[in-house]
Image (cartoon, helix red, strand yellow):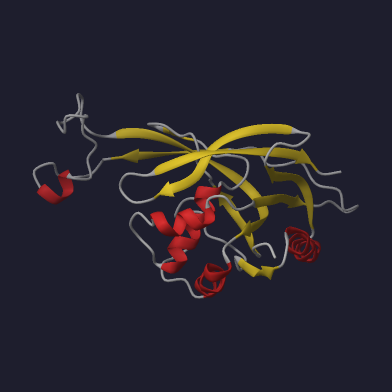
């Protein structure tokens, strides 16, 4: 038998799933990344550090997602909200003479004080009012532990950033395959008055094919990733 699927429901006023952000611009992908989802489970487990062996057991397995938006009176999906842009000042308000506070002020690559001071303006982008049903295939021996951790997390769980607080229980059960997972997700979406907007399949299929560098091989201070091909399909 194939490995089972863990169904996650990711819903919040704001979500952000970074995959190609650099410097002061922190973008969000239109749907959850595999690195973000596995990072979420690590937070639930209270698992820090590299986690190389654990990540290796999940790396080659499937992950699919269906995006849900609020539905209108006729059950048709309403237009998606545009990306929200926020900005944050990084490094302001710290005393550079205090050795601890000085660590929080951005420095040059040589570790020196930046020209004009260390305060920087950064831009952050967020998805608004979205919900995602994520069917994550996982090793049988890790599934029960992950399911228990998502229901009783060691660390707080957020959907991309700390201001992205989930508004529904993330764990929604373990199923034998992705079909059963998404049938359960549809029942929940119907209860919430949400309609499917698009689906993300792992691998190359008929549709918009993307290459994402989102399969984590190592977390911790020096993160490592590898590519994954996904196909985005609109829902009829």
Q: Residue furthest right?
A: 74
Q: Residue furthest top?
A: 115
**Residue at 58% across, 68% down:** 140
Residue 3 visible to the viewer: yes
- Height in image: 37 above or below 201? below
Q: How many labels, in total?
A: 0
Q: Is residue 58 left or right of residue 188?
A: left
Task: Work out whether residue 220 or residue 131 is closer to the camera in this orientation and state it.
Answer: 220
Please state the horizontal and vertical placement of residue 156, each as a whole percent of the image. Answer: 44, 65
Please state the horizontal and vertical placement of residue 29, each as a whole percent of the image. Answer: 58, 39
**Residue at 41% across, 31% down:** 22
Task: Work out whether residue 187 or residue 86 is closer to the camera in this orientation and state it.
Answer: 187
Task: Work out whether residue 7 or residue 54 is closer to the camera in this orientation and state it.
Answer: 54
Please state the horizontal and vertical placement of residue 3, each as a whole percent of the image. Answer: 64, 63
Quarter of the figure that contains the N terminus: bottom right
Q: Is residue 25 left or right of residue 120?
A: right
Q: Residue furthest front?
A: 1
**Residue at 70% across, 68% down:** 175
Q: Is residue 28 left or right of residue 198?
A: left
Residue 158 visible to the viewer: no
**Residue at 55% across, 43% down:** 126
Quarter of the figure that contains the C terminus: top right
- Height in image: 138 above or below 236? below
Q: Is residue 70 left or right of residue 83?
A: right
């Amino acid at each position: 038998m194939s490995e089972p699927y863990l169904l996650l429901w990711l819903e919040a006023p704001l979500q952000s799933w970074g995959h190609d952000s650099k410097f002061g611009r922190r973008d969000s992908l239109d749907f959850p990344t595999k690195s973000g989802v596995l990072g979420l489970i690590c937070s639930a487990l209270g698992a820090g550090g590299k986690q190389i062996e654990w990540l290796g057991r999940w790396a080659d397995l499937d992950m699919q997602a269906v995006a849900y938006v609020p539905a209108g009176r006729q059950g048709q999906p309403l237009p998606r909200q545009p990306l929200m842009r926020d900005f944050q000042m990084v490094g302001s308000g710290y005393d550079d003479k205090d050795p601890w506070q000085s660590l929080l002020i951005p420095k040059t690559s040589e570790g020196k004080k930046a020209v004009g001071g260390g305060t920087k303006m950064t831009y952050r982008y967020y998805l608004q009012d979205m919900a995602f049903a994520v069917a994550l295939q996982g090793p049988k021996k890790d599934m029960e532990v992950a399911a228990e951790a998502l229901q009783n997390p060691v660390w707080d769980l957020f959907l991309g950033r700390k201001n992205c607080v989930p508004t529904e229980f993330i764990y929604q059960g373990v199923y034998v395959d992705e079909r059963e997972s998404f049938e359960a997700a549809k029942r929940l979406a119907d209860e919430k008055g949400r309609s499917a907007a698009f689906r993300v399949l792992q691998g190359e299929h008929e549709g918009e094919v993307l290459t994402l560098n989102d399969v984590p091989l190592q977390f911790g201070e020096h993160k490592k990733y590898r590519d994954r091909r996904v196909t985005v399909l609109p829902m009829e």
